[in-house]
Image: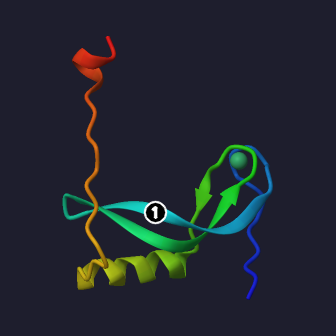
C-alpha cells in the first residue's frame, strides 16, 4: 500500500515514504520507536507523520512493551565544546 505525501511544507521538496526510527518523549522518558512508516523530505529531511500512525505510536507507548533497551550517549555542550 503506497501512501502519498504532499510536498514539504517547509521547502517544497518531494516527500517520500520511508520507515525510520522515531524518538518520542513520553511521560518524561525518551523512547525510540523503530520501523515507523513516515514521510521524509528529500531536500531538508523534515519528517511527516500520518495522524493514524501517531495514534498507533501513542497506543504502543501506553503498553510500555519494549522490544529491547538501548543506552543513549549524553553529551554536554557546555564545558566540552567551548
Ligand atoms: Zn523539505
Front residue of this view, candidates 6 and 46 = 46
Q: Tell me where residue 49 appears, x and y as whole percent.
A: 56, 68
- The residue sitting at the left extreme is 28
**Residue drawn where x is 74% and y is 60% of the image:** 15
Front residue of this view, candidates 69 and 41 = 69
The answer to whether residue 29 is left or right of residue 50 is left
Q: Residues within 10 Å of mark 1 (few under 14, many from 20)?
A: some
- The residue sitting at the bottom extreme is 1
Report how many numbered discs are placed on residues in the image. 1
**Residue drawn where x is 20% and y is 64% of the image:** 27
Q: Tell me where residue 4 appears, x and y as whole percent.
A: 76, 74
User: Which quarter of the rendering shows the C terminus?
Assistant: top left
**Residue drawn where x is 68% and y is 46% of the image:** 10
Determine if the C-beta at disc 1 is less than 8 A from ligand 1. Answer: no
Q: Tell me where residue 81 appears, x and y as whole percent.
A: 33, 16
What residue does disc 1 label?
A: 22
Q: How is the image coloured?
A: rainbow
In the rendered view, would you say 4 is above or below 22? below
In the rendered view, would you say 19 is above or below 74? below
The answer to whether residue 20 is left or right of residue 28 is right
The answer to whether residue 47 is left or right of residue 15 is left
- The residue sitting at the top extreme is 82
**Residue drawn where x is 65% and y is 48% of the image:** 45
User: Which quarter of the rendering shows the N terminus?
Assistant: bottom right
The answer to whether residue 44 is left or right of residue 36 is right
Q: Secondary structure at mark 1?
A: strand
Q: Tell me where residue 3 appears, x and y as whole percent.
A: 73, 79
Amino acid at each position: 500500500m503506497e501512501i502519498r505525501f504532499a510536498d514539504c511544507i517547509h521547502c517544497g521538496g518531494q516527500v517520500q515514504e520511508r520507515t525510520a526510527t522515531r524518538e518520542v518523549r513520553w511521560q518524561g522518558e525518551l523512547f525510540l520507536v523503530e520501523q515507523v512508516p513516515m514521510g521524509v523530505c528529500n531536500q531538508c529531511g523534515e519528517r511527516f507523520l500520518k495522524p493514524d500512525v501517531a495514534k498507533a505510536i501513542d497506543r504502543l507507548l501506553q503498553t510500555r512493551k519494549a522490544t529491547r533497551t538501548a543506552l543513549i550517549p549524553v553529551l554536554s555542550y557546555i564545558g566540552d565544546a567551548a
